[in-house]
Amino acid sequence: MINALQSTAVYLITGYTDMRKAINGLSLIVSEQLGHDPFDGSLFVFCNKGRDKLKILHWQHNGFWLYYRRLEKGKFKWPINEIAGEHIALSYRELSWLLDGLSLLQNQAHPAVSGFSNN
């Protein structure tokens, strides 16, 4: 299901989130702390303190999706130097890297190519 959302805006919520929060609690974080509209169709990504659990909140048509991922081994490469309770806009590609256990700063990835150049 997430693969169909490649053109959707993605926001990573910095710091750590209590994973006991469900849809209502996470949507309140999005609206009150970040000032975003949780109903705009964007993906909002949250992580726990142990960095082994993620939740993604997504509004679609007439209800919320709440995606949950728990790693059995390892940790997500969550950016820990950012101010807690703020957000970082990500590309869908960067979200895929994060879900695959990679850093958001991939200096070895192929650059995006768009159209033909005259060079």
Image (cartoon, grey):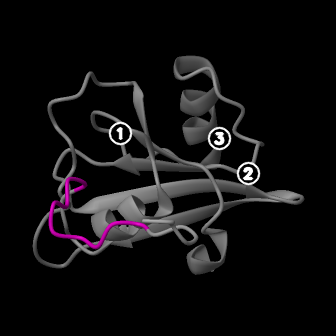
Question: Any magenta on residue 94?
Answer: no
Residue 34's quadrant in the figure?
A: top right
- Residue 7: percent from left, percent from top: 65, 62
Dots 1, 2 in contact, CB < 8 A: no
Q: In terms of secondary structure, where does tag 2 sit?
A: loop
The vertical placement of 117 against 57, above or below, is below
Q: Amino acid at mark 1?
A: Thr
Check the picture and name the quadrant holding the N terminus. Answer: bottom right
Q: Which residues are magenta?
A: 104-112
Of residue 69 and residue 2, the one placed in the foreground of this image is: 2
Q: In terms of secondary structure, where does tag 1 sit?
A: loop
Which numbered tag is attached to residue 17?
Answer: 1
Q: Amino acid at mark 2?
A: Gly
Instruction: Say which residue label 2 marks.
Output: 41
- Residue 101: percent from left, percent from top: 21, 70
User: Of label 3 and label 2, which has the lower sequence position?
Assistant: 3
Of residue 6 and residue 98, the one placed in the foreground of this image is: 6
Check the picture and name the quadrant holding the C terminus. Answer: bottom left
Q: Main secondary structure of the magenta part?
A: loop
- Tell me how far mark 1 sits from mark 2, CA to CA: 21 Å
Of residue 8 and residue 39, the one placed in the foreground of this image is: 8
- Residue 25: percent from left, percent from top: 57, 37
Q: Residue furthest front?
A: 119
Residue at the spot x=58%, y=74% of the render?
A: 2
Residue at the spot x=62%, y=48% of the render?
A: 23
User: Of label 1 and label 2, which has the lower sequence position?
Assistant: 1
Which numbered tag is attached to residue 24?
Answer: 3
